[in-house]
Image (cartoon, rainbow, N blue to C red):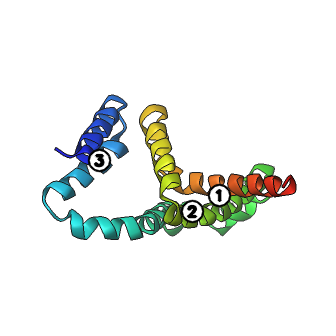
């Protein structure tokens, strides 16, 4: 049994104890792919395109109320009369811009990616978070790194 398999089984156990169905399904799915022997073909694709596929699936889920008619232009126009709607609009823009920088960081910096993934696993397993953390976390980390870089350059 490899170190990677042991680690995944530990994550499976954490997911079961924490009753986090998303983590249990994700770990089980990945172990199944590995154990049936198609990991060499599937894992590179998932690593390269997985974030984009996940974002697409989340986007589809968010758009369902629009396509079903539960939310329409009238609802959007009414929402714009609310200060909370403007806060939500600004927050959506802010997070999307931050996450875009996070994609680059995740692709180019493996040790940061590992820390973000572990942080997400902890958040999902222990705090019942949602696994969008690596992308948004990478964006926040990118922004924080740039701020630190900016202030460090002022004192050098």
> What percent of the width, then of the height, locates residue 41?
23, 70
Q: Secondary structure at mark 1?
A: helix
Instruction: Quote the CA–CA distance across marks 1 and 2.
Output: 7 Å
Residue 105, which numbered label? 2
N-terminal of the two: label 1 or label 2? 2
Q: Residue at x 45, y 32 (%)?
A: 126
> What percent of the width, then of the height, locates residue 61?
47, 61
Q: Residue at x 63, y 52 (%)?
A: 141
As rendered, which of 62 and 97 lies closer to the eye?
97
Residue 68 shows up from this direction: no
Q: Residue at x 20, y 46 (%)?
A: 2
| Rendered image quadrant of residue 143 | bottom right
Q: Residue at x 28, y 33 (%)?
A: 13
N-terminal of the two: label 1 or label 3? 3
> What percent of the width, then of the height, locates residue 6?
24, 40
N-terminal of the two: label 3 or label 2? 3
> Quick check: marks 1 and 2 in contact, CB under 8 Å?
yes
Instruction: Quote the CA–CA distance across marks 3 and 2.
Output: 24 Å
Q: Quadrant of the N terminus?
A: top left
Q: Secondary structure at mark 2?
A: helix
Question: Measured along the vertical axis of the image, is residue 61 above or below residue 19?
Answer: below
Question: Measured along the vertical axis of the image, is residue 24 above or below residue 17?
Answer: below
- Quickly name the residue at label 1: 142
- Quickly name the residue at label 3: 27
As rendered, which of 60 and 30 lies closer to the eye?
30
Image side of residue 113 versus residue 145, left or right: left
Residue 86 shows up from this direction: yes
Q: Residue furthest right?
A: 154
Instruction: Quote the CA–CA distance across marks 1 and 3.
Output: 27 Å
Q: Secondary structure at mark 3?
A: helix
């Amino acid at each position: 049994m490899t170190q990677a398999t042991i680690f995944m089984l530990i994550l499976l156990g954490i997911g079961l104890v924490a009753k986090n169905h998303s983590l249990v399904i994700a770990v089980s799915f990945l172990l199944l792919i590995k154990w049936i022997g198609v990991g060499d073909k599937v894992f590179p694709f998932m690593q390269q395109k997985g974030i984009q596929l996940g974002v697409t699936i989340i986007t589809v889920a968010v758009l369902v109320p629009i396509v079903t008619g539960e939310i329409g232009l009238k609802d959007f126009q009414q929402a714009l009369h609310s200060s909370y709607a403007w806060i939500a609009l600004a927050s959506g823009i802010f997070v999307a811009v931050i996450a875009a920088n996070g994609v680059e960081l995740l692709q180019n910096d493996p040790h940061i990616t590992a820390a973000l993934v572990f942080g997400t696993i902890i958040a999902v397993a222990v705090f019942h978070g949602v696994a969008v953390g690596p992308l948004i976390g990478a964006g926040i980390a990118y922004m924080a790194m740039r701020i630190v870089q900016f202030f460090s350059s002022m004192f050098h």
